[in-house]
Image (spheres, helix red, strand yellow):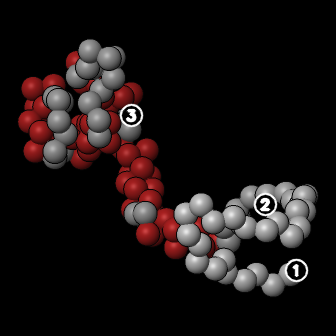
């Protein structure tokens, strides 16, 4: 590979002499895959490991009755775009499964206290 030298300072309108033009055939490479250790470090950095533990707790606590209640609450909180408010999903699960809240009237203040807007 030829050595690279920095360009000299140029003035506006100054012309340069072209000495050589080459076409290079190159292919891009995808980013390197994570190693197991690298993936765990990235998860720790992004706090995904903590969320995975919470998701495991949620899966263990879910039953048909709690699923029904969660769906009723989500439907009651739908926005005009047909979505639940941003960040409300996980907080609804927390409220029903771990706080014992069972109605929209109980869950709405809980969501507000957790910073969920638009409820």
Query: Which residue has dot 3 on it?
Result: 63
State yes or no: discs 3 and 2 in contact (Cβ < 8 Å). Answer: no
Residue at coordinates 66% horizontally, 77% vertically from top-left? 7
The answer for how far apart the CA atoms under marks 1 and 2 are is 19 Å
Q: Quadrant of the C terminus?
A: top left
Determine the image quadrant of residue 66: top left
What secondary structure is found at the residue carrying circle 3?
loop
Say if residue 65 shows up in the picture: no
The foreground one among 68 and 84 is 84
Q: Nearer the viewer, mark 1 or mark 2?
A: 1
How many neighbours does mark 3 have within 10 angstroms: few (below 14), some (14-19), or many (20 or more)?
few
What secondary structure is found at the residue carrying circle 2?
loop
Q: Is residue 89 left or right of residue 46?
A: left
Determine the image quadrant of residue 68: top left
Determine the image quadrant of residue 13: bottom right
Q: Quadrant of the N terminus?
A: bottom right
Q: Is residue 57 left or right of residue 87?
A: right
Query: x, y (%) of residue 98?
Result: 24, 46
The foreground one among 102 and 37 is 37
Residue at coordinates 23% horizontally, 22% vertically from top-left? 77
Query: Which residue has dot 2 on it?
Result: 29
Query: x, y (%) of residue 20?
Result: 89, 67
Residue 31 lies, with reference to residue 114, above or below; the image says below
Tag on residue 1? 1
The foreground one among 80 and 3 is 3
State yes or no: discs 1 and 3 in contact (Cβ < 8 Å). Answer: no
The foreground one among 97 and 79 is 79
How many neighbours does mark 2 have within 10 angstroms: few (below 14), some (14-19), or many (20 or more)?
few
């Amino acid at each position: 590979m030829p050595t690279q030298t920095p360009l000299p300072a140029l003035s506006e309108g100054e012309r340069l002499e072209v000495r050589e033009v080459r076409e290079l055939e190159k292919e891009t490479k995808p980013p390197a895959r994570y190693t197991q250790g690298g993936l765990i470090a990235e998860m720790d950095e992004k706090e995904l490991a903590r969320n995975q533990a919470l998701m495991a707790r949620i899966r263990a606590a879910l039953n048909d009755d709690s699923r029904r209640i969660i769906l009723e609450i989500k439907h009651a909180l739908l926005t005009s775009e047909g979505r639940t408010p941003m960040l409300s999903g996980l907080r609804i699960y927390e409220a029903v499964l771990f706080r014992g809240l069972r109605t929209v009237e109980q869950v709405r203040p809980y969501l507000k206290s957790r910073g969920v807007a638009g409820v």
